[in-house]
Image: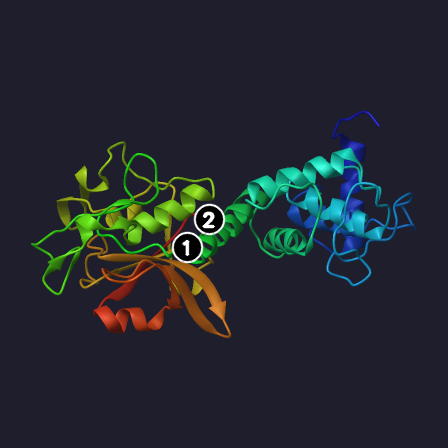
Amino acid sequence: VDGQFGQQTFAAVEAFQTSAGIGVDGQVGPQTKHALYNGVSGSGSYTGAPTPILLNSPACPDVMSQGEIDGCVTELQSELNLIGDHLAVDGQFGPATESAVAAFQTVRKLPVTGTMDQIAKTELINAGAAIANGALGAAQAMLEYNVLSEAKRLYGLNPPIPYAYGAGHDTTPGETMGECDWTNGGGILNGTCYGKDTKGLDCSGFTRYAYYLAGKDINTTNDVDLGSRQATSSGGTFWDSATSGQMLASFAHQVSSIDLRPGDLIFFGKDSNNAWNSDHVVLYAGKVNGVDMVYAEPTTGRNLSYEQLAPISAEFGWTDYYHMSVYA
């Protein structure tokens, strides 16, 4: 053991990939890591660690803690390594494993106990699945996982986050006081200005906040007001809105509707011939029983919602013509 990834190590990785039935490239990517970690057992080449037991198995304690030595810990260490840790997979819940668990709980905004209860187990299993089952790298898969987790957490807050026109675009993302625009009706309901008296988020303020909490700010300008930058598109020169500003972001790219991934942004507008003329944006949450679902701040008088995608176009007369992905 010399700590160097040389020709012998490269050949050993290729041999393992061949035996595991995965793509042979000699690189230890997410798929290979998953096969390695979940291949740990008490037989064959992987000696010294108890045979892995799935964390959600009845055989595993409801709460795992330091001092435990069994296959549940083997699996726990494997899952932690899958999302970026570098633990020795030995089936022993020692100080290093406890620290890794505490770090995971901190990132996921769970109670930091260093022990694994059922909630923490589920969070970890889902995080590992986002990496192992997709074609994304670990960092990208974790961004996807974290964006959805943050959107779900924000949706579950009590009291709920209200829609506030123009809100959520300060230097630091998050809830702010809204405003009213009597020209286009923004922040106005039944002839009354609610925007300036409401602290919350507008549609793009919400998408920005969810990404910010997940570790990526999708603000596209250095200005406090996302609507303060002049931009040029095929449709001419215009003052970009917050939604159009997110569409112009260099880190994002357009994808077709069939290639949408959970966490992607879907933009709406009444003019489908001008992709930059966007009126609304939602965060795609994936399919549930075959139905496309989204998280969204809909409009004045409503709160952050989790709803079907299809009715949004019908309700407001918008066309969901532009789909943006931050994933490679």
Q: Residue placed at 32% from the left, 40% from the top?
A: 219
Q: Residue placed at 23% from the left, 66% from the top?
A: 318
Question: Left or right of 182: which side holds 251?
Answer: right
Name, please, the residue furthest toward the top: 2
| Label 2 packing within 10 angstroms: few (<14), some (14-19), many (20+) | some
Q: Residue placed at 41% from the left, 42% from the top?
A: 212
- The kind of residue on which mark 1 rests is Asp
Closer to the camera in the image, 280 or 101? 101
Mark number, residue 248? none
Is disc 2 placed on a helix, strand or loop?
A: loop
Q: Position of residue 322 (x, y in %)?
A: 31, 58
Q: Position of residue 70 (x, y in %)?
A: 86, 49
Closer to the camera in the image, 317 or 274? 317
Q: Quadrant of residue 108?
A: top right
Q: Are marks 2 and 1 in contact (CB under 8 Å)?
A: yes
Q: Position of residue 291 (x, y in %)?
A: 45, 73
How many numbered tags mark residues here? 2
Q: In this figure, which residue is indicated by the disc labeled 2?
A: 327
Is residue 124 something one can see in this rendering? yes
Query: In what quadrant of the picture does the N terminus appear?
Result: top right
Closer to the camera in the image, 315 or 157? 157
In this view, 249 is above or below 206? above
Is residue 27 something one can see in this rendering? no
- The kind of residue on which mark 2 rests is Tyr
Question: Left or right of 310: which side holds 183?
Answer: left
Is disc 1 placed on a helix, strand or loop?
A: loop
In this view, 189 is above or below 41? below
Q: In this figure, which residue is indicated by the disc labeled 1?
A: 264
